[in-house]
Each structure stands twice: as C-alpha cells, then as structure tokens.
Amino acid sequence: MRLTAITMAVAATALSAGIAAAEMVAPTQVSYGEYGAIDTSLSGQPGDPENGRALMIARGKGNCLACHAVSQLDDAPFHGEVGPPLDAVGSYRTPEELRGIVANAKQTFPGTVMPAFYKTTGFIRPGDGYTGTAAEGELDPILTAQEIEDVVAFLMTLQGS
C-alpha cells in the first residue's frame, strides 16, 4: 500500500510539472480565433496588473503610451494619439480579445500599425535591401508570454469612463 501511495505521489508531481510546462505557448504556436482573440493564457499563469502597468509605461518594452492615452497613467509623460485611448478598455473588451490584440493586433485589425508584441517570424527586413545587415532567423518577441498576461491584467483594470 505504501509503495502505491508513493508511486501515485511521484506520478502526480511529474504530471503536474508536465502540465505546467505544457501551458506555456510559444509565439509560433499561438492559436488565434476568427477575430484574433486568444482563448487561453500564453504563460499558464495569471497576469500581474502592477507589472502590466510598468510594462505599459516602459519605453524599452511595451511602450504602450507612445501610441495610446490612458488617464489612469497620467503620472507618466508623453501619451500618444496614434492608437485609441485605452480608458475603460477592460469594460468593453474581454481578456481573450485583449490578449490577441497585444500579442498580434494584425490578427484583429489587419491594417493596424500596432506592432506584434508576441511574434518571432514573418518580419519584413528592409535592412537587406539597404545595408545587407538585417537580422537572420527568429527574433525574440518584444514581450514574453507572462508579460502579455501582465499587460492584459492591467488593461482589465481599466473599467468605467
């Protein structure tokens, strides 16, 4: 009986570790819905809205404020006007829609100038035509899977007007 309980505990631990590892979705494996939504977490973990807030402001990462105005982030300078204001976006978009838009907005809005924050392939590389020094192979995504989840968690806090 003891051997069975130990065997079951080891199997359960191995299974849960495998499930946790399997929940992370690589940029090339993302499954977008018909209108660009991503139904499941990219990291398998809940997002941290405080880290999402920091990423929205960070000039070297998300830099969302370069294009979007967000009243809740008035303490950060230089809000842009290229993209729509994000006030109350959490009240009219679902987490699945926001996850898809942040990961690759072109899946939802084909003509958008918003960059794909979770994409590693399929880039146009003009450097080859001008300098011959464009990067080769896959690029790292701008945001990690967890950072996408963090930004979505922050966007979901933007409720009301």
Image (spheres, rainbow, N blue to C red):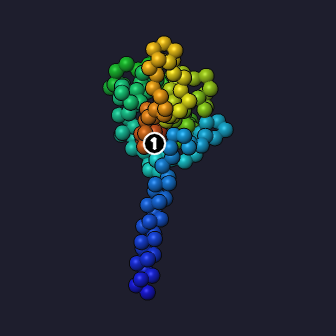
Q: Residue at coordinates 45% horizontally, 63% vertically from top-left?
A: 16
Quadrant in the rendering for residue 6: bottom left
Give the x, y percent position of residue 140.
44, 34
Q: Is residue 33 above or below residue 134?
A: below
Q: In this view of the protein, which residue sits in the foreground, 105 or 121?
A: 121
Q: Residue furthest right?
A: 34
Give the x, y percent position of residue 71.
41, 26
Residue corresponding to mark 1: 145
Q: In this view of the protein, which residue sits in the foreground, 80 or 87?
A: 80
Q: Residue at coordinates 42% horizontally, 67% vertically from top-left?
A: 13
Amino acid type at circle 1 is Ala
Quadrant in the rendering for residue 107: top right
For disc 1, the neighbor class at 10 Å (few under 14, some 14 to 19, many from 20) is many
Q: In this view of the protein, which residue sits in the foreground, 2 or 138?
A: 138
Q: Is residue 95 above or below residue 87?
A: below
Give the x, y percent position of residue 109.
61, 27
Q: Quadrant where the N terminus lies?
A: bottom left
Q: Residue at coordinates 41% horizontally, 24% vertically from top-left?
A: 65
Q: Residue at coordinates 54% horizontally, 48% vertically from top-left?
A: 40
Q: Residue furthest bottom?
A: 1
Q: Is residue 80 above or below residue 155?
A: above
Q: Is residue 37 left or right of residue 14?
A: right
The kind of secondary structure element at disc 1 is helix
Q: In this view of the protein, which residue sits in the foreground, 13 or 68?
A: 13
